[in-house]
Image: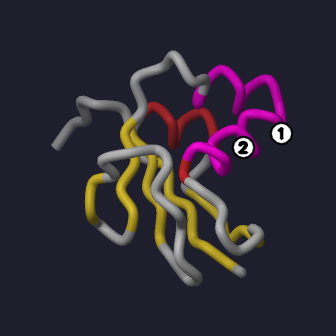
Amino acid sequence: MQVQLKFFASLREQLGSGERLEIPAGTSVAALRAQLCARSAVHAEALAPGRAVRCALNQQMVASDSAVIPADAELAFFPPVTGG
């Protein structure tokens, strides 16, 4: 299934604005983040588990990284404080 990724603020500077990505059904936010970290050193640094990175799933803040991503979802990753 496909999802749309978006990156904002400093993450956008490091990783670009976003992309469409094919992921397996049942993928959690945590699993997707781990998959992205495995892509490159830049991804690993920007999205490392210890880094304060927030995620919104279909424009709703994700309360738990164990949330399962539905098909055609939009995921936005951003630091806890962004500019206006």
Which residue was labeled with disc 1?
39
Where disc 1 sits, the SS reads loop
The residue at 42%/32% (across/down) is 53
Q: In terms of depth relative to the viewer, which is nearer, 34 or 26? A: 26
| Label 1–label 2 contact, CB within 8 A | yes
Residue lying furthest top: 50
Where disc 2 sits, the SS reads helix
Q: Is residue 37 left or right of residue 68?
A: right
Residue 38 picture quarter: top right
Residue 24 picture quarter: bottom right
Residue 39 picture quarter: top right
Asked if 1 appears above or below 32 in the picture, the reply is below
Disc 1 packing (10 Å; few <14; some 14–19; many ≥20) = few
Color style of the picture:
secondary structure
Which residue was labeled with disc 2?
36
The residue at 51%/36% (across/down) is 11
The N terminus appears in which quarter of the rendering?
bottom right
Residue lying furthest left: 84
Q: Is residue 27 magenta?
A: no
Q: Position of residue 66 (x, y in %)?
A: 49, 49
- Using the numbered discs, state the Cα–Cα distance from disc 1 to disc 2 in whole angstroms: 5 Å
The residue at 58%/43% (across/down) is 30
Q: Main secondary structure of the magenta part?
A: helix
Badge number at residue 62: none
The range drawn in magenta is: 30-47
Mark 2 belongs to which amino acid? Leu
Q: In terms of depth relative to the viewer, which is nearer, 40 or 34? A: 34
Mark 1 belongs to which amino acid? Arg
Q: Is residue 25 left or right of residue 60?
A: right
